[in-house]
Each structure stands twice: as C-alpha cells, then as structure tokens.
Amino acid sequence: MSNRPEQYWPGLPEERNNFSYLKYQALGGCLNQDFFESSLVFLDSGQQLRKREKSYCLSCRHYAGLAGLSPNLDQEIIYAYLRAMMPPARREENGKNGSPWLLSDQALLAEVFLLTEDADSYRQLVASFPNIFMKKDKRRAA
C-alpha cells in the first residue's frame, strides 16, 4: 500500500475540494460538518503541527500498525489535528454529537480513513477492532 496522498486524492488539492460532507456521511462518517471542514482546511493550509500534536502521530501509527496499516502523512496530520481538539475536561462529557473527543483513538483513526476516502484501510481497521463503535452505530461495518 502506497503512503502517497495522491493515492487518495489524485490531483491534490483540486480533487479534495470535490469530496463533500455528504459523501463523507454516506461513507459512514460521524464527525459534524464543522470538524470535517476544519480538518480539510487545516490540511490544505499547510500549517505545521505543534509539538504536542506531533506526539499524536505516534498514536495514529501505533493503532494503524496494530491493524497492519501504515497511515500516510495526510492521515497522520488529520488524526493529530482532530485529537488535539480534545480538551481534557471534556473527555467525560457527553458533548455535541460529531465531536472528535467523543471518539476512541481507533474510532478517530477510522474517521480519518473516511476523511481521506481510504476505504480499504477503513475496512481493515474495523476488521481488526470490530468493537470500536458503539452498538447503536452498526451502520459502520461497511
């Protein structure tokens, strides 16, 4: 499996602009539209991850590695960006649906694979961690 972003969005970033929130939801994505859009804007802006956010890349690689996957740089950046949004005080809170802090590390990684339209990695991750989603979210087994 190639780690090149072009595998997921040929002709970056033009193709990425055609990836809509509705398509993401149709794939099973559960982040709300604000987080969906801010993730892609962050990625396209070329902003650098802060030191703390870079440490989240290790977590992304770890869980992907347990599933026999190797995330590409864009996937690591989106994962770290979304995970960094998780304020410690809200980890136990039942906040608004579609918030990244309501997701486990594995579930957030699955969302990242959906955000990057990497269906093969998504399926392999879900197969490796079949219980990462709540029972009420059975539609995710795609």
Image: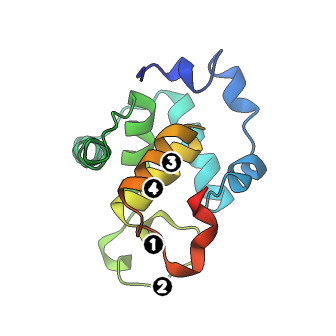
Q: Residue at x 40, y 22 (%)?
A: 3
Q: Which residue is mark 1?
A: 102
Numbered disc 3: secondary structure? helix
When the figure is inspected, residue 49 is found, relative to residue 105, above or below; the finding is above
Residue name at image x 60 percent, y 38 percent? 117
Dot 1 crowding, Cα within 10 Å, few <14, some 14–19, many 20+? some
Disc 3 versus disc 2: distance between alpha carbons? 27 Å
Residue depicted at 41% across the width and 67% down the height: 132
Q: Amino acid at mark 1?
A: Leu
Q: What is the distance, in whole Å, between disc 1 and disc 3 at their CAs?
A: 21 Å
Q: How is the image coloured?
A: rainbow
Few, some or many C-alpha atoms within 10 Å of disc 3 (few <14, some 14-19, many ≥20)?
some
* Closest to the observer, 23 or 74: 23
Mark 2 burial class by Cα count in 10 Å: few <14, some 14-19, many 20+: few
* First in sequence: mark 3 vs mark 2: 2
Q: Residue at x 62, y 24 (%)?
A: 9
Q: Secondary structure at mark 1?
A: helix
Residue 126's tag is: 4
Instruction: Report the disc number at residue 94.
Output: 2
Q: Which residue is mark 3?
A: 123
Q: Amino acid at mark 4?
A: Val
Disc 2 secondary structure class: loop
Q: How far apart are the alpha carbons under marks 2 and 1?
A: 7 Å
Label 4 close to label 2 by CB (< 8 Å) = no
Mark 2 or 1, nearer chain start: 2
- Which of these two is toward me, 133 or 84? 133
Q: Amino acid at mark 3?
A: Arg
Q: Is residue 97 visible?
A: no
Q: Could you say which is closer to the camera, residue 16 or residue 125?
A: 125
